[in-house]
Amino acid sequence: MTEVRLAAVDPKSSGYDTLVVGVTTTKRDSKLDIAASTGLGHSERKRILAGLTQVGAKAKPGSVTKLPGVSGIDIPQLICVVIGATEEEATPEQIRQAAGAGTIAAEDSAKVAVVMPGKAPADVAATAQGALLGAYRYEQCRGSGTKKPAKAAKTITVLTDSNRDRHVREAVRQAEIVAQEVWFARDLVNAPPSALHPIELAEAAVAQVAGLAVETLVLDEADLEEGKYGGILAVGQGSINPPRLVRLEYRPERSAVHIALVGKGITFDSGGLSLKPPTAMETMKCDMGGAAAVLAATAAIARLGLPATVTTYAACAENMPSGTAQRPGDVLTTLDGTTVEVLNTDAEGRLVLADALVSAGRDEPDVIIDVATLTGAQMVALGNRVSAVMSNSDDLRDDVVRAADMVGEQFWPMPLPPELRESLDSPIADLANIGDRMGGMLTAGLFLQEFVDPETPWAHLDIAGPSFNDSKPHDYTPKGGTGVAVRTLVQLVKDLADAASK
């Protein structure tokens, strides 16, 4: 894991391989500028701007320009990232994105220094978090034959004149904890499906919270059979790798609110007997992105010591076709006794979530949040960077969107239209697992709503597209697993705890 440090601005320091500089724009004519609040001296800022002018750098937000050293700055490489705002207007998220774009571009640097505008705790924390998120590399599968393996930086040093301010240091500490857990979620999503079956996912969850004030429980296939978790068992019955249900419980002494987190953990989704096309399977190792998010968020919440009880459920299974797999037309019985006619075995996430939601509800939480890479319809509606949130509570739905906005993740409120509910009716069972094709994201949410007490505020987060970036990196987001929803969940728990304690 890359280490984050704070230090005073010293352009003559020779201890770094790369310096990432956030470039603002002037208020009058939107030309490139470097803010005085970076801490860089007037002469250094002037020479950097001259170098950018010489290579024809443009004031395009997010653009990255590499300069092979600048006179007066004793660092071999400068990476300049355009923030896309003036010094006064730059937001923490714009700073976070610029810092991340810089460390993504710092491919061969073991020691990276980052200097961005702003000295306030929120700005410095955004710099640290963005730089750490951008520095992420998935290195576990690199072999000796790799000519130039991608390596994460060993250290990231945020240069700021407020490096000794205790409020700044605490803000950076918290930002670093959350970023480290995003790394954990990304590692889980990026792991090859041959290396991360339900058993290994459960083991990773338990290992991540070892030493924290978190109780763990893992139900194996025998426990699931005895407990009558029919949804999880049905989805996992086609695989030689048996399913698991992971339960984590963080219960601090001073708890203001009890929140249940539920995550879909399909470690590989072939579609089952309703087989996906081959190209649609290429990224299906990401179908446990919801479980990765809730597990990582729980670890972060415990490490931060937030005053909220959190019970977390990760429903883990591998959806495979075989002679033992569930068939279209089968009827299963979920944990609460609801019978479900399985019309499409590729609509499996809602089946494992049904059991997990019922189990979470039995803990009598104040709020339930589930996170899942649930539907292709989410991508059709909102694309690959905006997640959906549906809820039985307008207030909770707004809370999720507000928390996401604060941390720089994009969630959009979506409805649960009651007129679509009848499309889930089955002539032989209580429910069918699919409804109308039009509005498929919404009918999936309506299906899940059946397994939540209507008196309990509940929100469903569909992260199907944003959980995995299969195009080029952008801002602090690498190619592959993104760790989306971790930051939103942590902020949401903090917000709900703060509101409950007032």
Image: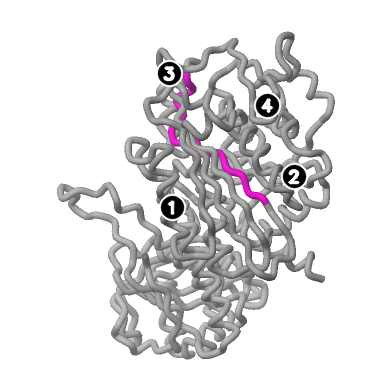
What residue lies at 82% left-to-right and 39% top-to-bottom?
Answer: 454
**338 over 362 or under it: above or below:** above
Q: Quadrant of residue 53?
A: bottom left
What's the distance in space between the residues labelled 3 and 2, CA to CA?
33 Å
Q: Amino acid at mark 3?
A: Pro
> Would you say residue 59 is visible in this rendering?
no
Q: CA distance from mark 1 to mark 4?
A: 29 Å
Q: Say few, some or many: other residues with alpha carbon within 10 Å of mark 2 (under 14 / 14 to 19 / 20 or more).
A: many
Left or right: residue 420 versus residue 219 is right
Closer-to-camera residue (286/465): 286
Circle 3 residues within 10 Å: few <14, some 14–19, many ≥20:
many
Task: Please state which of residues 468 and 292 is positioned toward the viewer in this rendering.
Answer: 292
Q: Amino acid at mark 4?
A: Gly
- Circle 2 residue: 458
* Circle number at residue 362: none
Q: CA distance from mark 4 to mark 2?
A: 19 Å
Q: Residue at x 56, y 50 (%)?
A: 294
Question: Earlier along the polypeptide chain: callout 1 or callout 4?
Answer: 4
Residue linked to disc 3: 321
User: In the image, 199: left or right of 235?
Assistant: left
Magenta highlight on residue 265:
yes
Residue highlighted by disc 1 = 478
Label 3 and label 4: CA atoms lie apart by 23 Å
Instruction: Nearest to the eye among marks 3 and 4: give it.
Output: 3
Tag 2: amino acid: Trp
414 inside magenta stretch: no
The kind of secondary structure the magenta stretch mainly shows is strand
Q: Which residue is mark 4?
A: 440
Q: Earlier in the sequence, mark 3 or mark 2?
A: 3
Q: Earlier in the sequence, mark 3 or mark 4?
A: 3
